[in-house]
Image (tube, rainbow, N blue to C red):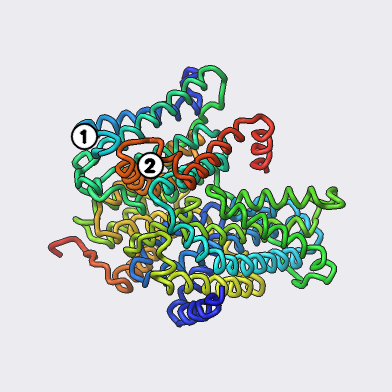
Amino acid sequence: MSDILPNIIMGFGIALTWQNVVLCFFGCVIGTAIGVLPGIGPLTTMALILPVTFWLSPVGALIMLSGVFYGAQYGGSTTAILVKIPGETSSVVTVLDGYAMAQRGRAGPALAIAAIGSLFAGSVVTLLIAVAGPALAKVALLFQSADYVSVMLLGLVSAVVLAHGSVLKAVGMIVLGVALGLVGTDVSTGEYRMTMGVDVLFDGIGFVPLSMGLFGLAEIMVNLESAGAGEMQAKPVSGLWPTLADLKQSFPAMVRGTAVGTVFGILPGGGPTIAAFSAYSLEKKVSKSPERFGRGAIEGVAAPESANNAAAQACFIPMLSLGIPPNALMALMIGAMMIHGITPGPEIISKQPELFWGLIASMWIGNLMLVVLNLPLIGIWVKLLQVPYGYLFPSILVLCCIGTYTLSSSTGDVLVMTAFGVIGYAFRKLDCEPAPLLLGLVLGPMLEENFRRAMVLSSGDWSIFLRRPISAGFLLLAAALLVAVTLPNIRRGREEAFRE
Amino acid sequence: MNVVLASKDFLAGTLYMSFGLLGLWLGRDLESGAAGSMGAGYFPRLVCALLIAIGAVLAMLSLMQAGERLERGKWRPFVFVTLSCLAFALLLHPLGLVLTLALTTVLARLADGNVRAIPLLLLCALLIVINVGIFVVGLRVAIALWPAGL
């Protein structure tokens, strides 16, 4: 405990170097911009700038990428409140009460509460990462291969439970991701596997070409099909400051939202979207006057906006302390680390403290920057909505191509990206959510390696997974989750949670 | 199309099964080994078999209950986005970055109807300047700007 303070001071020393401040600022600006723009999510954007981060220091790369991620949570609420268009799926519920407030001329306080709630959640969770991260990493050092296999299985199961739509389809996408992750050179024997003799695939299916194709290209194709969204007019914002009564009313909602967001952020398969939905429904349940919700209740803005930012940051906890990504976005962060030659795992905090503490300190700085970026400069962001998609998408497409190419100077990677664009389009058409696939892709090789090692240690005895108490505990949890999702009333609740 | 064959779940199940079969076939020469000393083929076979099983269950369930049907897509965005990326991959080395970027942009813009010449030219010029600026001048990526021999 006592060593947290010096560590945090060291972290600020790293995060406050001018390069890292600039990178954090860029990340937040890009994040806010794509948060405002509907149709481009943080996942696509992070995949897009991944090649650029190749030239940065590892800490700088992670600082910038995380800035994009939590910046998008701030930006997404702006358009939700002002023009009834959620910039991100995690701001869908904010539309309900946020837009209602805007229509009553209270857009300013709604925006301010959203930003204050996000800042509050961001600060609380950053502190939590600083405390819980190293503690969890210490526990994780006790893990053996069998335990890792089970915790990853638990993660995959819970990703399925929390995914949209059909459970079976989500399981299929994860398994497909695991299978795709196995393409390339086998680490243990050095044999080429399922490469079709194509040399770009010898090192495996690249993380960047796959995610650019699956998210970037497929998204463009689908967006162009649903006819262009015309120009949007937002009412001018006047009177930014919330009243004392507003603050009093929304503070408990922020606390509850932060708590809900933290839980859903840490849960494997969770993330900002489901956190926001859950926080909103919780708020409605505990409220003494639930009939105000949907008509401009300020708690209806405060709770989900705190929750989505809390979740966006809380999902760094399992990623940084266990090296296991809880969702596709963190899988992307792991991908970024591996590009820089960092092996994710519990050793990161002790062996590369500057990475961990620098990143945490930058989150505080980033959250502060975002409040400044979002409140006084709101007009600029709303103007962004007037950029027609017809000019935006060719720019994204060109960036996908050139970004993928520069990563390893290979046009073969661009072809892989194109192929995954086509496959991704098919997935969208068939309602197969692509995010679990990305999770499978990253976890696949880790899963195989640990599975193999566990089986060697037990000389082929499968019961090893049940004999180790840690592993058995995780498996039991996973089984309980699977049973729970098939129970009719929980299933109904899950469907309700995803309905808008 | 037949009602069953057009159901999204049936098609998704078939897609999963095809990927699983493709994986098994591509990895047909890999050695399985035993659980205690796994060969390169053990885990891939396990995963592919699981994928086929999931696909089969999904497809079978879709035969029993009528699910959502596949909506018609538009060919235009799909074809031109794909073409535009293919053009980039295949033309970059013979043509150099500047001409390739122009062609990629034009093809991409065609994915959306209602294209006007002047804004398109401006967009091409803008994207060339920005991307050459970031990647070639800024990050010093070694890409030829013009066709070889010029």
In the displayed structure, A55 sits above or below B85; it is below
Tell us which disc is closer to us: 2 or 1: 1
**Helix, strand or loop at mark 2:** helix
Quadrant placement of the C terminus of chain A: top right
In the displayed structure, A494 sits above or below A445; it is above
Query: Label 2 crowding class (10 Å Cα cut-off): few <14, some 14-19, many 20+?
Result: many
Quadrant hosting residue A347: bottom left
Q: Distance between the residues labelled 2 and 1?
A: 19 Å
Quadrant hosting residue A47: bottom left
Q: Residue A265 shows which numbered tag?
A: none
Q: Which chain carries label 1?
A: B
Q: Mark 2 lies on which chain?
A: A
User: What percent of the width, then of the height, locates residue A210?
Assistant: 37, 48
| Number of marks in picture | 2
In front of the other: A283 or A351: A351
Quadrant placement of the N terminus of chain A: bottom right
Q: Residue B31 shows which numbered tag?
A: 1
Specify whether A246 is left or right of A426: right
Q: Residue at x 39, y 44 (%)?
A: A421
User: What percent of the width, then of the height, locates residue A353?
Assistant: 43, 72
Q: Residue at x 38, y 69 (%)?
A: A351
Q: Which residue is drawn at 35% across and 36% down?
A: A461
User: What percent of the width, then of the height, locates residue A109?
Assistant: 76, 67
Label 1 is placed on what type of residue? Answer: Glu
- To which residue does mark 2 refer? A178
In the displayed structure, B82 sits above or below A311; it is above
Direction right: furthest residue: A289
